Image (cartoon, rainbow, N blue to C red):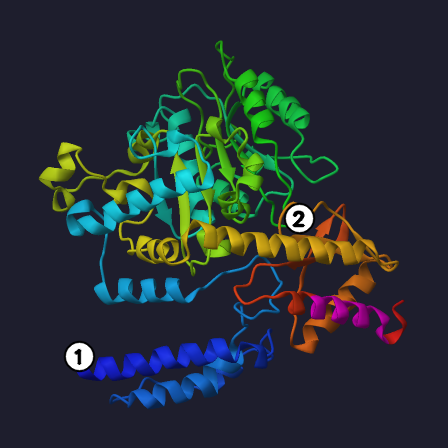
């Protein structure tokens, strides 16, 4: 493809995306295809010869679009939003065009330095502690998702707790014998348990702490569990606090959790016990034995661009790491996760491998950041470019207006639920997620959700709170307006009335 052909076809592709945005409301939000239908429409083998670009766009419409669930649709209220704004798309396009592999400063200095600078901007923008700035001992790095950030934090915590022994001799050699134990609330994201499995901690060494009436972690229950584990000779090494749980946007009390961690830190030798299984990492000689505090604010973190929501940051200055997803609620398309640490040496000592073919004089000098040492993969995309485009295009006030509009719409929806005789709220509404249910019980709520989703213009998902089904309406779409929220409420009421459900 020549530059001139690329220019022509690129314009065709941009036009296709623009028309897609214009026509979003004409598509059913949920795909209606049956399993295997997309594949059955495709040729069994790749073409022997190249085809005209127009054929690609034609088959995109014919075969791919029917199998798309439209996350950018204004009636998409499922899960949490996955924003994609035009500014971000263009930034991502340029990133793809540049084709940078930004594993080290030397492989593209701008990729590294723009990322460092933009993430320092976000510290101030979100009211986060200065300890996360790159000018000190900490700093930020862009990962793909919060799942990777949680895994990275857990691995760094494991290495800190074992004296970085696994980097030298394996976690089973030369250790005291204390089993490592990790903690999170019963409402935490499933990525916590997956990270524990990947890190070799295992399901048997994680503790899911009970929650209070608002579904936030109970610090007293955490204190009891950590104290019991310490008394049993185990090593409480990692606590994940969630600011905005997936099920209900519950806000764990970070400051109180940090108090518990400080109080339960090992201040004296503990009688070692043999690990239950040989594959489980065991504790080493970390100076004070305190657990690593990780704060997962994947969805809610973006709201801190608004000063009125920064109460969620209380206690974050005591955290070892913090993460949030601009690709959820900050107009930046997937994937873009921001991960901060208070002491970046814990990451680099965990992940750094220095084969000769990756060594450079400037990297060895310590004068630059080589982000390959800050996470699991070696290779990395130029993700900061799209985030930079978003911040530059919308500005701080534009982002605040965007967040506030969604919070206001969710509050209004919640008021309609509260005024209803048939529905009730089941959790607080601190941001833009409303959890509610029909008073008729689980079967009725599932039927309501299925009927609404089958209608095509609205998509809801559910969770279980206190063992009962709760419907979730998450406001956060780039093109979602009040009329879409009002239409969703009308559809929900109609679905409840249909077939005698009321």
Q: Which residue is mark 2?
A: 248
* Residue 382, numbered label: none
Residue 12 x %, y % = 33, 83
Numbered circle sitting on residue 3: 1
Q: CA distance from mark 1 to mark 2?
A: 49 Å
Residue 103 at what x, y percent from top left?
23, 49
Residue numbers of the magenta segment: 486-498
| Dominant secondary structure of the residues highlighted in magenta in the image | helix
Front residue (pair 211, 196):
211
Q: Is residue 203 visible?
A: yes
Q: Quadrant of the N terminus?
A: bottom left
Tag 2: Cα neighbours inside 10 Å, few (<14), some, or many (≥20)?
many
Give the residue at x 42% y 25%. 161
| Residue 120 inside the magenta-drawn segment | no
Extreme residue in the front direction: 397
Q: Check the picture and name the quadrant holding the C terminus.
A: bottom right
- Please check the rendered image and state whether residue 495 is part of the magenta-colored stretch, yes or no: yes
Q: Residue at x 22, y 63 (%)?
A: 98
123 is higher (above) or lower (below) than 93? above
Which element type, helix, strand or loop, lies under badge 2?
A: loop
| Residue at 53% from the left image edge and 77% from the top image edge | 24
């Amino acid at each position: 493809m020549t530059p001139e052909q690329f220019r022509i076809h690129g314009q065709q592709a941009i036009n296709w995306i623009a028309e897609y945005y214009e026509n979003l409301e004409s598509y059913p939000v949920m795909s209606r295809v049956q399993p295997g239908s997309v594949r059955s429409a495709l040729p069994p083998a790749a073409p022997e010869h190249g085809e005209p670009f127009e054929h690609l766009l034609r088959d995109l419409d014919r075969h791919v679009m029917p199998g798309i669930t439209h996350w950018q649709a204004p009636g998409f209220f499922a899960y949490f939003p996955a924003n994609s704004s035009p500014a971000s798309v263009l930034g991502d396009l340029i990133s793809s065009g540049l084709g940078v592999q930004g594993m080290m400063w030397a492989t593209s200095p701008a990729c590294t330095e723009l990322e460092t600078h933009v993430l320092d901007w976000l510290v101030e923008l979100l009211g986060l502690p200065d300890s996360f700035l790159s000018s000190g001992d900490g700093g930020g790095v862009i990962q793909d998702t919060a799942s990777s950030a949680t895994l990275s934090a857990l691995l760094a915590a494991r290495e800190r707790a074992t004296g970085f022994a696994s980097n030298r001799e394996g976690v089973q050699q030369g250790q005291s014998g204390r089993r490592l134990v990790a903690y999170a609330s019963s409402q935490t994201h499933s990525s916590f348990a997956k990270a524990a499995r990947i890190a070799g901690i295992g399901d048997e060494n994680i503790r899911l702490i009970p929650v209070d009436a608002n579904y936030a972690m109970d610090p007293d229950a955490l204190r009891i569990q950590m104290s019991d584990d310490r008394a049993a000779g185990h090593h409480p090494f990692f606590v994940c606090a969630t600011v905005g749980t997936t099920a209900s946007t519950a806000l764990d009390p970070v400051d109180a959790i940090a108090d518990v961690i400080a109080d339960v830190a090992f201040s004296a030798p503990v009688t070692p016990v043999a690990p239950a299984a040989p594959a489980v990492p065991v504790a080493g000689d970390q100076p004070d034995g305190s657990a690593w505090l990780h704060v997962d604010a994947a969805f809610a973190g973006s709201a801190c661009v608004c000063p009125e929501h920064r109460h969620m940051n209380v206690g974050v200055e005591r955290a070892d790491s913090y993460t949030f997803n601009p690709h959820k609620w900050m107009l930046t398309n997937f994937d873009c996760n921001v991960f901060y640490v208070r002491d970046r040496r814990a990451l680099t000592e965990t992940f750094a491998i220095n084969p000769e073919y990756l060594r450079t004089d400037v990297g060895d000098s310590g004068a630059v950041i080589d982000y390959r040492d800050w996470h699991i993969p070696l290779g990395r995309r130029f993700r900061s470019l799209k985030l930079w485009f978003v911040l530059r295009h919308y500005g701080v006030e534009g982002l605040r207006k965007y967040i506030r509009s969604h919070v206001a719409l969710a509050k209004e929806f919640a008021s309609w639920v509260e005024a209803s005789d048939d529905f009730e709220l089941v959790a607080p509404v601190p941001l833009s997620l409303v959890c509610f249910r029909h008073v008729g019980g689980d079967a009725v709520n599932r039927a309501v959700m299925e009927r609404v989703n089958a209608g095509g213009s609205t998509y809801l998902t559910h969770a279980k709170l206190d063992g009962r089904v709760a419907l979730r309406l998450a406001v956060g779409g780039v093109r979602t307006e009040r009329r879409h929220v009002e239409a969703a409420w009308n559809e929900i009421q109609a679905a409840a009335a249909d077939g005698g459900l009321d």
